[in-house]
Image: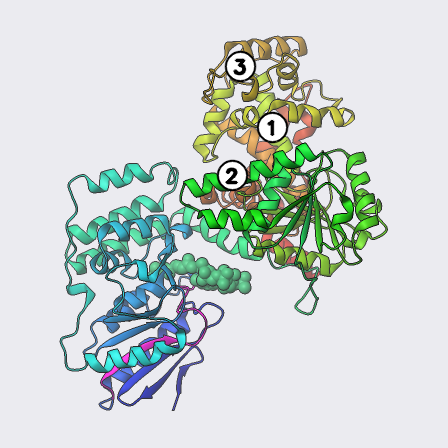
């Protein structure tokens, strides 16, 4: 008879085996109720003379997603997870973990503390704490090296990547093929262990590693861990498993865990964990809103963007019709996709058979009529309103009723595009980021008439194609590109005032971005920004200093890497940017012409001048309702623009600096800027309000939703 210890944990018996079952949907997080429940259940079963052994299992699809991250902020750790696991490991009756589904973080640590582990083949296990800015703090860094080996443990803990349970030699004592067979096998194993010496992981020793192993490992991960605080602490904790006896190793792990937990990076990364999930909580639809089935997709344009978008669907097993008007362009597009897949195969990421399966899902066409039966069509043609409208008129004529018509525009008015059709309710923006087959972000743009079921369908479809979708409203550039505008504008203005491209790039690289604005601009092509400026000269005409150096560079043929010259120069066949005095000369001449005094500019000023206007724009975007939450902006910037995740995104970063400090700095720069550019620094009313009231973005959003 099953006895609930708490709503989240129950006990049952099978003969002389006690079974503890976790039930804390959605992920069996090890919240206070679960830790208390497991501790009480263990204590009860260990005292029960009718019980010889214990099995710990789960009755939801996961074994456990680990510690309850939402409890970290409360500071309530009682009963501490390490103490509960100590109780399990020191039990004088054998304890078996029955791992039915994913076991992550504290969930895997729970299993590691048991005396035996049985798992379903294929289940993923991992210690992803590093992604939350912390390390496994319930014995994972000491027990995993003892059960597997140091190298496996280091790789798992520092990368945070999960592995299939069967690939981890030493971890499990038995594997079963189906979840149905698990409990019986676990109970049999428990029964067979009765009366035998109890194999405690803490009693095992760690196999030695060659001299210099840890230094070699540090070097091998230096690039991907640049700027992060937790990975080095993870390494030190695993080192302790070799250097110290188990108990002292646990203490060292605990101390390193607390160091990480107190770091601003942990707060930022945990903020981001919830931000990413909150992006999927959208007020425009609810549980009852239907979705439209998407079995076949059409894509207009087989260029870099269209091809990348098409690959996402083929990767997810969804057939695609790829349309180009010119057969040569179509052939070229399909050939590029094949080459991309073949490169992946060469790197061992795909098999030859998978390449062929994916290519078979991509059917080229030059006829709009072939899109008559698709459920969703995504347009990825030249970024000009007239061209887009012509495409949507054609789609309106050929697509079946109910088909979703999406545009991949990165700047244009989706309402105007929707009005080119007789069915604006079916029109939506799907703004992919380049390269579209790699970048995780998808800005989903709702226009005035977009129907809730269309929004819900596209938001859910994003998950199917492994994108993180953020719903945004219509304005020039939506969220991401609108905010990048002040970022590049100020970088250019600083160049005019005397900072060099390499100074500016270095400051942003050290802040944590993958590269600074000038290296990025050269890679993308400076002509792209130039064309955008050409299309909005009216809006910028009042400021003759606006990106003036960038304009001069383009006009001198310095369009970036592809020309071997941009904000830097490049040697033939080499992508390394080389500082070029000619660029500084151009900046000097322009400064003289405009009466701008060149000077030495501090690193702090460079950072603030570039990031604070971007944050200010974020505030305007929030106030206008273009983004519904500050955390959505953070998700867009981390996944779309490489903003360092350990700073939580620009809006979280703003709160760590203090909104009042940002406001003061903006006002200071506004005064300092002189004749040109002052208006760009006008603080957003929302920033003024929050700085005055001391409210956070989240508190403001909550208040707004209630009013
Ligand atoms: C740890 O264990 C520390 C220990 O070493 C030491 C302690 C002393 N806690 O992702 P989903 C929520 S640190 C609280 O959409 P999926 C999530 O916010 C932990 N909540 O589902 C969402 O809520 P909502 C180490 C959590 O099926 C809902 O559950 N563990 C937690 O796509 C569904 O989540 C990790 O880092 C949690 N641990 O993926 C694993 N996990 O519906 C973190 C999820 O309100 N979790 N939620 O938006 C994951 O990676 C994925 O959630 C998982 C399921 C793969 C488990």
Cα distance in 3D space between marks 1 and 3: 20 Å
First to last magenta residue range? 51-68
**Decide: marks 1, 3 in contact (CB < 8 A)?**
no
Location of residue 551 in the rendering, given as x and y in whole percent from the top left corner? 66, 18
Tell me the residue at 22%/61% (across/down).
147
Location of residue 667 in the rendering, given as x and y in whole percent from the top left corner? 62, 31
Circle 2: element type = helix
Location of residue 677 in the rendering, given as x and y in whole percent from the top left corner? 67, 24
Q: Is residue 5 left or right of 70 when viewed as pictured?
A: left
- For the residue carrying disc 2, how many other residues have a C-alpha within 10 Å: few (<14), some (14-19), or many (20+)? some
- For the residue carrying disc 3, how many other residues have a C-alpha within 10 Å: few (<14), some (14-19), or many (20+)? few
Tell me the residue at 58%/28% (across/down).
524
Cα distance in 3D space between marks 2 and 1: 31 Å
Q: Quadrant of residue 650?
A: top right
- For the residue carrying disc 1, how many other residues have a C-alpha within 10 Å: few (<14), some (14-19), or many (20+)? many
Residue 64 colored in magenta in the image: yes
Q: Is residue 695 left or right of 151 when viewed as pictured?
A: right
The residue to which callout 2 is attached is: 340
Residue 323 colored in magenta in the image: no
Residue 599 image label: 3
Residue 461 image label: none
Mark before the other along the chain sequence, 2 or 3: 2
Mark before the other along the chain sequence, 2 or 1: 2
Furthest toward the right, the residue is: 422
Of badges 1 and 3, the one in the foreground is 1
Tell me the residue at 36%/72% (across/down).
35
């Amino acid at each position: 008879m099953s006895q609930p210890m708490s709503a989240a944990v129950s006990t049952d018996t099978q003969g002389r085996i006690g079974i503890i079952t976790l039930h804390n949907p959605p992920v069996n997080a090890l919240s206070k109720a679960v830790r208390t429940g497991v501790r009480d259940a263990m204590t009860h079963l260990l005292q029960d003379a009718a019980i010889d052994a214990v099995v710990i299992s789960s009755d939801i699809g996961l074994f456990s997603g680990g510690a309850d991250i939402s409890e970290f902020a409360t500071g309530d750790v009682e009963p501490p997870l390490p103490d509960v696991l100590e109780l399990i490991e020191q039990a004088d009756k054998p304890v078996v973990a029955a791992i039915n589904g994913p076991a992550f973080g504290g969930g895997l640590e729970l299993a590691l503390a048991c005396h035996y582990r049985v798992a379903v083949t294929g289940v993923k296990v991992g210690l992803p704490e590093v992604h939350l800015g912390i390390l496994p703090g319930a014995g994972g860094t000491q027990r995993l090296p003892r059960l597997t080996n140091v190298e496996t443990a280091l790789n798992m803990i520092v990368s945070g990547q999960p592995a299939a349970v069967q690939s981890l030699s030493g971890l499990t004592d038995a594997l079963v093929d189906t979840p149905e067979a698990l409990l019986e096998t676990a109970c049999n194993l428990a029964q067979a262990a009765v009366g035998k010496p109890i194999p405690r992981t803490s009693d095992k020793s760690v196999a030695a590693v060659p001299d210099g192993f840890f230094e070699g490992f540090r070097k091998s991960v230096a690039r991907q861990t640049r700027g992060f605080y937790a990975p080095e602490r993870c390494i030190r904790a695993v080192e302790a498993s070799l250097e110290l006896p188990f108990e002292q190793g646990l203490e060292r792990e605990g101390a390193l865990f607390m160091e990480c937990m107190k770091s601003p990076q942990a707060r930022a990364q945990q903020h981001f964990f919830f931000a990413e999930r909150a992006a999927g909580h959208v007020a425009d639809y609810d549980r009852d809103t239907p979705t439209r089935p998407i079995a076949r997709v059409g894509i207009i344009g087989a260029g870099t963007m269209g091809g990348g978008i098409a690959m996402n669907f083929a990767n997810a097993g969804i057939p695609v019709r790829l349309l180009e008007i010119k057969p040569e362009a179509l052939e070229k597009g399909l050939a590029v996709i094949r080459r991309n897949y073949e490169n992946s195969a060469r790197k061992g990421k795909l098999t030859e058979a998978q390449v062929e399966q994916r290519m078979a899902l991509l059917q080229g066409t030059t006829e709009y009529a072939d899109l008559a039966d698709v459920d969703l069509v995504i347009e990825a043609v030249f970024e000009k309103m007239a061209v887009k409208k012509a495409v949507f008129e054609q789609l309106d004529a050929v697509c079946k009723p109910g088909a979703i018509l999406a545009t991949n525009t990165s700047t244009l008015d989706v309402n105007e595009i929707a009005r080119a059709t007789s069915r604006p309710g079916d029109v939506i923006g799907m703004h992919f980021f380049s390269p579209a087959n790699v970048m995780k972000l998808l800005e989903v743009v709702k226009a005035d008439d977009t129907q809730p079921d269309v929004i819900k369908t596209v938001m859910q479809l994003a998950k199917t194609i492994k994108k993180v979708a953020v719903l945004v409203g219509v304005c020039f550039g939506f969220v991401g590109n609108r905010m990048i505008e002040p970022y590049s504008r100020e970088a250019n203005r600083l160049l005019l005032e005397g900072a060099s491209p390499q100074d500016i790039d270095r400051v942003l690289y050290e802040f944590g971005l993958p590269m600074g604005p000038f290296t990025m601009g050269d890679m993308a092509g400076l002509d792209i920004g130039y064309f955008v400026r050409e299309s909005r000269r009216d809006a910028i005409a009042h400021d003759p200093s606006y990106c003036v150096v960038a304009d001069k560079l383009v006009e001198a043929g310095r369009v970036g890497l592809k020309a071997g010259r941009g904000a830097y120069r490049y040697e033939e066949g080499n992508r390394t940017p080389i500082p070029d005095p000619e660029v500084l000369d151009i900046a000097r001449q322009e400064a003289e012409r405009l009466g701008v005094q060149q000077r030495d500019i501090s690193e702090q000023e460079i950072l603030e001048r570039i990031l604070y206007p971007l944050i200010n724009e974020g505030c305007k975007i929030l106030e206008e309702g273009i983004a519904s939450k500050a955390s959505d902006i953070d998700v867009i910037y981390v996944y779309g623009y490489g903003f360092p995740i350990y700073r939580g995104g620009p809006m979280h970063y703003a709160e760590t600096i203090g909104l009042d400090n940002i406001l003061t700095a903006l006002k200071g720069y506004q005064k300092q800027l002189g004749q040109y550019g002052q208006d760009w620094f006008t603080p957003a009313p929302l920033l003024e309000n929050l700085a005055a009231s001391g409210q956070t973005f989240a508190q403001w959003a909550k208040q707004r939703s209630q009013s």
